[in-house]
Image: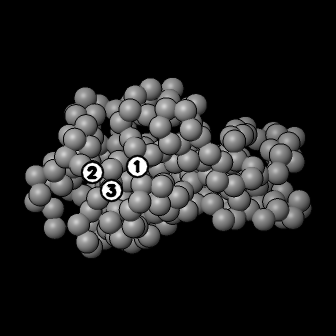
Amino acid sequence: MTAPLVIAFDYDATLTHTGRLSPEVTRALEQARAAGFGLVLVTGRQLWDLERVCPEARSLFDRMVAENGAVLIRGESSSLRLAERVDPRLAQALDARGLAVAEGEVLVATEARWLSVVEQEVARLGLDVRLVRNRASLMVLPASVSKASGLSHAVASLGVELAQVVAVGDAENDREMLEVAGLGIAVADAVEELKAVADRVLALPDGEGVVALLDELVAGRFG
């Protein structure tokens, strides 16, 4: 790849395994940004939930993409929906069938074990959506939305090409993001599906692996 200018990260099980960033990960992110790298966070979490566990997120990252590619956050106050919300009838139908459902600005989420039920209701309602698995979670998104599409919007707003992006993730929903980036990297404890398509698999898990990677990049040893 060309020299990387932007580093994009998933959040859970990539930057952290506890829900909160460790001091070591925070230090490595700050050093990478001070060295001139743009930092982008691309997460399946809703923005309010991300800021609940990572209140410093807006100051650490140049851009954030929430809801698995559906919402772009620029700076302290700018938030932009990148798609129309999933038809609210779906959440109502799933709730009526006894499923625990979370609705975001765009997505609908539930547990992955209810995949067949969600498929039934999507088909019954005739919705143009995609079902995206993230380990034990299942997200329903507009057909055009993915972490890849969200990352594309984020890096375009930074004036950078996707070929200049290193993307790091751990789960099924990170696959498209890794595939469109100049270099796709899986942490050591990523799901096998992601390891199979990654350009590189780190030797260490989640935040430990990310710290080692960022230290390489900042020191210019990456290649």
Quadrant showing the N terminus:
bottom left
**For the residue labelled by badge 2, is the local secondary structure a helix, a strand or a loop?**
loop
Are the residues flagged by discs 3 and 2 in contact, CB closer than 8 Å?
A: yes
**For the residue labelled by badge 1, is the local secondary structure a helix, a strand or a loop?**
strand
**Residue 146, horizontal then vertical, whole percent:** 58, 60
Q: Real-space Cα distance between discs 3 and 2?
A: 5 Å
Residue bearing mark 2: 37
116 vs 26, left or right, is: right
Q: Amino acid under label 1?
A: Val
Are the residues flagged by discs 1 and 3 in contact, CB closer than 8 Å?
A: yes
Q: Is residue 7 above or below residue 101?
A: below
The foreground one among 153 and 88 is 153
Q: Amino acid under label 2?
A: Phe
Q: Real-space Cα distance between discs 1 and 2?
A: 10 Å
Q: Amino acid under label 3?
A: Val
Q: Residue at x 53, y 42 (%)?
A: 73
Q: Earlier in the sequence, mark 3 or mark 2?
A: 3
Numbered label attached to residue 6: 3
Graded by Cα atoms within 10 Å as few (under 14), some (14 to 19) or many (20 or more), the crowding at tag 1 reads many
**For the residue labelled by badge 3, is the local secondary structure a helix, a strand or a loop?**
strand
Numbered label attached to residue 40: 1
